[in-house]
């Protein structure tokens, strides 16, 4: 049997991962820059409240980018959407370079959020559609590794270079991934969805590397049957939210997204420098940022090696629960400091707790739910609603993220840091319970098998479409929901 060559899948994933590297750099931008703003190392006049709004504006931008992707992804393709995402990054960097007022940084954050929304929506869809099922998790998580590498780059150099140099870097990276992604193939799923069988066959052959034309035609016939089956249904927002077959996927995706965002990982990273300063740990800011970024990157590498070996569910519920324990510990330290008002002489002996707790919680969450929550939604929605589902999920995530980021400063002013960390810990405990109750295992399953697992009424379809692999010649008819689907392999050979 022709097993093919996966080289193109790996190279394509690397090219796409450069976009994730850019997202990582931009996401970590605020960590060193906030300290420069507070230390008056720039010409920008900005207050704490304006900083809170600046960080929160990333989320409306994320929602707008996701919404734009909903139309571009289905009409122009996954590849075109990825290329278009470079534009808001470049324009946002120009505004950041020329900023003299807080509103200009708010605009930069909005534009960067738009680019991130586009990438965050299209990349999981694209990789889920081009990757073989036994390496799909690893390839998808490799983009998270590059995201972590981007964060490490920003944290490692951000404390040592000027605000101007930081933003010049943000001009170069989008151009780099735009050039790299000019080479990548379009998703065969997208071509089949648009009825372009010949183009789908060409891209599938390029991705799979089959030497035997018969094997390629069999694979194409199976994909074509699955796509036609899924596209019988509408791809509208109305279909997504009214179709009973999508309800489990919606609940799972929305619950995981809410738990991920409200656990505070992004907000803690944004305010990491200020949090560490208030903890009075005896480490320089540059050391803190480098250690945090380096640990996150190394753990990201580990997650790609483990997820397809041990499965999604164990990583999810164990990481939620363990992260909650360490966030609660950090909150307890600040409770002793801010409420009990333990003497500084005693606190100095345990001042390592906040930074250590944050690092360990970051290790656990990166190994588990932070990485997997970007993989699972792309696996659990069928192709007919996948783009609209991912867009809707990212808009929902943007709303939750906007509220979480904007609320940080208010909660801190009212309760102190202990209240912030205890709330984050409570959310992660609820996230662990949610996974145990609702989230199925998707490891090692094809996209169609996952639909059978969630919907429970497509088993017959899978069995029949799998028969396409067993036929050696001629036309094969598969009965799908009472409809005769004729796949003409000999005609495909002549396309």
Image (cartoon, rainbow, N blue to C red):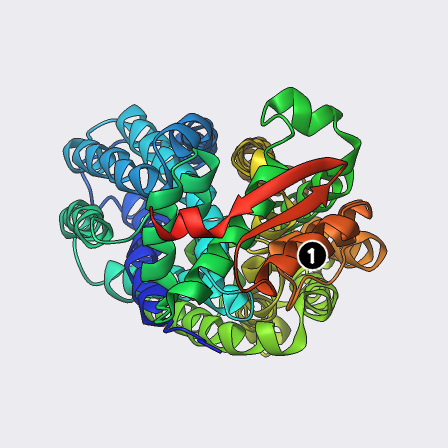
Taking the image as drawn, is residue 413 in sight? no
Q: Residue at x 38, y 53 (%)?
A: 493
> Residue 72 location in percent, x, y?
38, 29
Taking the image as drawn, is residue 54 in sight? yes
Which of the two residues, 71 or 199, is positioned nearer the viewer here?
Answer: 199
Q: Judge from the rendering whether residue 162 lies leftward or rightward of residue 228; answer left or right.
A: left
- Residue placed under numbered mark 1 in the picture: 449
Q: In this view, does 195 lie above or below 311?
A: above
Q: In which quarter of the image is residue 309?
A: bottom right
Q: Judge from the rendering whether residue 77 lies leftward or rightward of residue 410; answer left or right.
A: left
Q: Judge from the rendering whether residue 284 lies leftward or rightward of residue 425; answer left or right.
A: left
> Residue 340 location in percent, x, y?
74, 58
Q: Find numbered disc 1 in the image and state the secondary structure of the residue it sits on.
A: helix
For the residue carrying disc 1, how many other residues have a C-alpha within 10 Å: few (<14), some (14-19), or many (20+)?
some
Q: Which residue is drawn at 41% across and 71% down?
A: 297
Q: Residue reaching furthest top?
A: 238
Q: Residue reaching furthest right?
A: 437
Q: Which residue is drawn at 31% across and 66% down?
A: 8
Q: In this view, does 22 lie above or below 149?
A: above
Q: In which quarter of the image is residue 467?
A: bottom right
């Amino acid at each position: 049997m022709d097993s093919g060559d996966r080289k193109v899948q790996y190279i394509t994933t690397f090219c796409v991962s450069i976009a994730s590297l850019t997202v990582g750099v931009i996401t970590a931008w605020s960590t060193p820059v906030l300290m420069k703003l507070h230390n008056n190392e720039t010409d920008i006049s900005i207050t704490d409240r304006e900083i809170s709004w600046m960080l929160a504006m990333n989320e409306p931008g994320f929602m707008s980018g996701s919404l734009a992707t909903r139309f571009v992804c289905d009409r122009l393709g996954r590849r075109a959407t990825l290329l278009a995402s470079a534009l808001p990054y470049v324009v946002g960097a120009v505004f950041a370079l020329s900023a003299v007022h807080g509103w200009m940084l708010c605009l930069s954050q909005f534009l960067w959020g738009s680019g991130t929304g586009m990438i965050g929506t299209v990349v999981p869809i694209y990789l889920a559609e081009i990757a073989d099922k036994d390496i799909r998790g690893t390839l998808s998580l490799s983009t998270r590794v590059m995201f972590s590498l981007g964060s490490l780059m920003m944290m490692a150099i951000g404390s040592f270079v000027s605000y101007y140099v930081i933003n010049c870097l943000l001009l170069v990276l989008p151009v780099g991934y735009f050039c790299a992604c000019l080479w990548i193939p379009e998703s065969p799923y997208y071509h089949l969805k648009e009825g372009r069988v010949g183009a789908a066959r060409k891209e599938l052959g390029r991705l799979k590397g089959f030497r035997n034309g018969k094997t390629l035609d069999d694979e194409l016939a199976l994909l074509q049957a699955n796509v036609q089956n899924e596209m019988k249904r509408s791809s509208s927002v109305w279909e997504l939210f009214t179709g009973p077959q999508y309800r489990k996927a919606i609940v799972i995706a929305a619950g995981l997204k809410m738990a991920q965002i409200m656990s505070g990982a992004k907000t803690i990273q944004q305010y990491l420098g200020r949090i560490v300063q208030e903890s009075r740990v005896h480490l320089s800011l540059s050391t803190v940022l480098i250690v945090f970024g380096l640990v996150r990157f190394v753990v990201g590498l580990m997650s790609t090696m483990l997820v397809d070996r041990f499965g999604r569910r164990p990583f999810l519920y164990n990481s939620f629960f363990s992260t909650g324990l360490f966030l609660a510990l950090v909150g307890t330290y600040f409770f002793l400091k801010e409420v009990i008002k333990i003497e500084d002489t005693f606190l100095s002996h345990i001042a390592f707790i906040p930074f250590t707790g944050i690092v360990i919680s970051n290790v656990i969450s990166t190994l588990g739910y932070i990485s997997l929550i970007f993989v699972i939604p792309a696996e659990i929605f069928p192709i007919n609603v996948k783009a609209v589902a991912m867009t809707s999920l990212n808009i929902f995530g943007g709303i939750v993220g906007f509220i979480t980021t904007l609320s940080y400063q208010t909660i801190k002013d009212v309760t102190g840091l202990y209240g912030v960390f205890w709330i984050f810990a409570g959310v992660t405990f609820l996230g662990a319970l949610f996974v145990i109750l609702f989230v199925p295992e998707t490891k090692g399953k094809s996209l169609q098998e996952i639909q059978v697992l969630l919907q429970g009424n497509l088993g017959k379809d899978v069995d029949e479409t799998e028969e396409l692999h067993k036929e050696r010649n001629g036309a094969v008819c598969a009965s799908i929901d009472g409809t005769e689907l004729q796949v003409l392999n000999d005609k495909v050979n002549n396309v």
